[in-house]
Image (cartoon, rainbow, N blue to C red):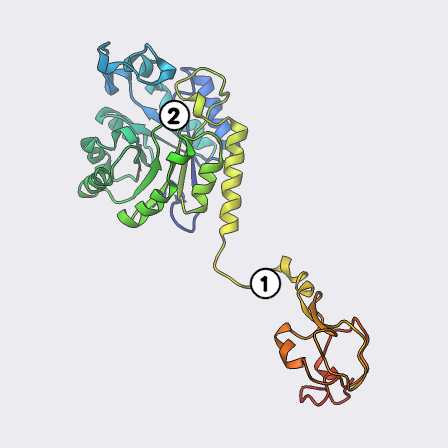
């Protein structure tokens, strides 16, 4: 799977997405500042959301349109989305800013008009949110563009995820990544279940990753350690500012710490090897070996009292301990001498000059 110039998948760097969402608070300059912060924090991409209040819901105060989130008591969905949406006239300009910094820039569409708009912008891929996992027509619309799709799976049953994957593929889509997501804001770590991410990779034959709403940076770093090809995390400039997503977003220094942690984990995973690294070479001498630990006279037998396995590693390998016990010393040996075959009387391994 490729997004822009970046290859996504096992053996590649984890693709880190900074989700802006509504953290711009309807301020274009703040949106630009978030993009710059994402670049400074080491993100690979910035993602926004493309909708209006009218394309995502209805302007109604009926009970079913009331927001259940305790942070927005008394608001309707329409009122919240009206405050959180990213003005469409900004989006081409924001893409230019991001691309100018070397960042990929794409969006989550929420209806057909958003997909058409983003196609005109020339986005390199699409993201579909967890709540739209069940919007099969929208998934088919995105698949028809031929662009890669990153699909969040929060709240989705295995059957619902398979239905979405099948719909994408039957509509002509090929490049797909599934993100494990817990649709709770913030998401408690005990409800994230990263092992499901690993299962999805095998069950659906796709790249996988994490869309994370937990507080802190530990969970996305752990996701990278167990094979996440993609990590998405919300980014804001200041979490104390009021916004629909700011309270579970990372500030720039935290996002930087997350990316640094992911990159260290990637380096640490490495390959399967038992070779001694260059840094370990100096420690080899500190391994255990056989030493004479009491003075021994020629002809005296080697016993557990006068031969021991100790550090450093200058003497015979410890595998020869049982071979040596009961044999006779070929010469006088002082305490603290690394034991050699030359010290063992009558041994065929002994050198010509003995001791």
| Residue in the image at 63% along x and 81% along y | 323
Q: Quadrant of residue 173?
A: top left
Q: Which x, y percent locates residue 179?
A: 34, 38
Q: Which x, y percent locates residue 105?
A: 39, 32
Badge 1 is on which residue?
A: 276
| Residue in the image at 67% along x and 86% along y | 349
Dot placed on the residue nearer the N-terminal end, 2 or 1:
2
Badge 2 is on which residue?
A: 185
What element does badge 1 sit on? loop
Q: 134 or 157: which is nearer to us?
A: 157
Q: 347 or 60: which is nearer to us?
A: 347
Disc marking residue 147: none
Q: Residues within 10 Å of mark 1 (few under 14, many from 20)?
A: few
Instruction: Using the rendered image of the protein, determine whether residue 13 is visible from the camera's viewpoint.
Output: no
Q: Residues within 10 Å of mark 2 (few under 14, many from 20)?
A: some
Q: Which x, y percent locates residue 279?
A: 64, 57
Residues tagged 2 and 1 counted as in contact (Cβ below 8 A): no
Q: 196 or 146: which is nearer to us?
A: 196
Q: Nearer the viewer, mark 2 or mark 1?
A: 2
| Figure check: 247 above or below 296 | above
Q: CA distance from mark 2 to mark 1?
A: 46 Å
Q: Which x, y percent locates residue 284?
A: 66, 64
Q: Quadrant of residue 277?
A: bottom right
Could you tell me which quadrant the C terminus lies in?
A: bottom right
């Amino acid at each position: 799977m490729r997004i822009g110039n970046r290859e996504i998948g096992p053996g590649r760097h984890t693709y880190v997405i900074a989700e802006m969402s509504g953290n711009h608070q309807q301020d274009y300059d703040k949106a630009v500042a978030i993009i710059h912060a994402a670049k400074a924090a080491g993100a690979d991409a910035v993602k926004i959301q493309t909708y209006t209040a009218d394309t995502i819901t209805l302007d109604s105060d009926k009970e079913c349109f009331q927001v259940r989130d305790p942070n927005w008591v008394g608001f309707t969905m329409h009122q919240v989305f009206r405050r959180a949406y990213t003005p469409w006239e900004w989006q081409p300009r924001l893409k230019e800013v991001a691309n100018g910094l070397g960042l990929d820039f794409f969006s989550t569409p929420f209806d057909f008009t958003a997909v058409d708009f983003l196609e005109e912008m020339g986005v390199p891929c699409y993201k579909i949110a967890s709540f739209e996992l069940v919007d099969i027509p929208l998934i088919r619309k995105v698949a028809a563009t031929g662009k890669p799709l990153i699909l969040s799976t929060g709240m989705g049953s295995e059957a619902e995820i398979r239905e979405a994957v099948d719909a994408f593929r039957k509509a002509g889509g090929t490049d797909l990544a599934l993100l494990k997501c817990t649709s709770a804001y913030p998401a408690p770590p005990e409800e994230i279940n990263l092992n499901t991410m690993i299962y999805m990779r095998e069950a659906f034959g796709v790249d996988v990753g994490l869309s994370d709403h937990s507080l802190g940076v530990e969970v996305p770093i752990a996701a990278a350690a167990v094979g996440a090809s993609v990590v998405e995390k919300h980014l804001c400039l200041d979490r104390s500012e009021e916004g629909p997503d700011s309270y579970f977003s990372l500030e720039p220094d935290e996002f930087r710490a997350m990316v640094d942690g992911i990159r260290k984990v990637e380096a640490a995973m490495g390959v399967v090897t038992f070779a001694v690294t260059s840094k370990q070479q100096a420690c080899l001498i500190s391994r255990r070996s056989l030493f004479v630990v009491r003075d021994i006279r020629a002809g005296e037998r080697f016993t557990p009292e006068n031969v021991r396995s100790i550090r450093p590693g200058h003497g015979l390998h410890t595998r020869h301990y049982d071979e040596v016990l009961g044999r006779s010393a070929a010469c006088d040996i002082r305490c603290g001498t690394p034991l050699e075959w030359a010290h063992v009387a009558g041994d065929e391994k002994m050198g010509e000059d003995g001791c």
